[in-house]
Image (cartoon, rainbow, N blue to C red):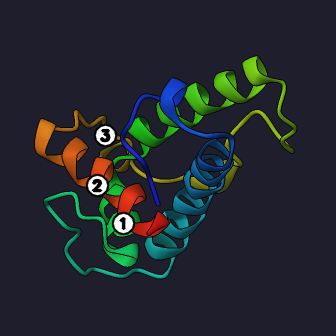
Amino acid sequence: MINLKPVCLLTARQLIDEYDSCIKIVRLAATYYDRGYTTALPQQYTITPRGNLFFFYNKLGWIEQRFLQVVREIRFRGLIFPREYLPHWADHLPNEWWQDWDPAAADELKTGRRPRRSLE
């Protein structure tokens, strides 16, 4: 799942999860597009596992920037990770899939609540 907190506030485990989620979203978005699916993508951010990833399929520009922030933070903390770039699985996707996104305060509150519940 994508966590909307600033990367400097994420734990090491959350950083690695975020890193993996960014790569997963790119791979899933490319597969979704290549298979010709036409289901409408969600218009609002949600924290359900499927909805969280599915929402970002046409926001790969934001995912790419988030990935780079995560990589910088991982490198800053001296953690080990396999690659510093997003795989090229989605290079063929149209420009509409590379949108940016600005999370609203309500979206950030959703992810702020999630870690506390999952730790209980």
Q: Amino acid at mark 3?
A: Gln
Label 3 neighbourhood size at 10 Å, few (<14), some (14-19), many (20+)? some
Question: What residue is disc 1 on?
Answer: 117
Instruction: Tell us which disc is closer to us: 1 or 3.
Output: 1
Total number of numbered discs in the rendering: 3
Q: Which residue is mark 3?
A: 99
Q: CA distance from mark 1 to mark 3?
A: 31 Å
Badge 2 density bin: few <14, some 14–19, many ≥20, Cα 10 Å: few
Q: Earlier in the sequence, mark 2 or mark 3?
A: 3
Q: What is the secondary structure assignment of the residue under circle 1?
A: helix
* Callouts 1 and 2 close, C-beta under 8 Å: yes
Residue that carries the numbered disc 2 in the rendered image: 113
Q: CA distance from mark 2 to mark 3?
A: 26 Å
As helix, strand or loop, the secondary structure at mark 3 comes to: loop
Residue at 40% across, 74% down: 49
Q: Say which label, 1 or 3, has the lower sequence index.
A: 3
Q: Residue at x 65, y 55 (%)?
A: 20
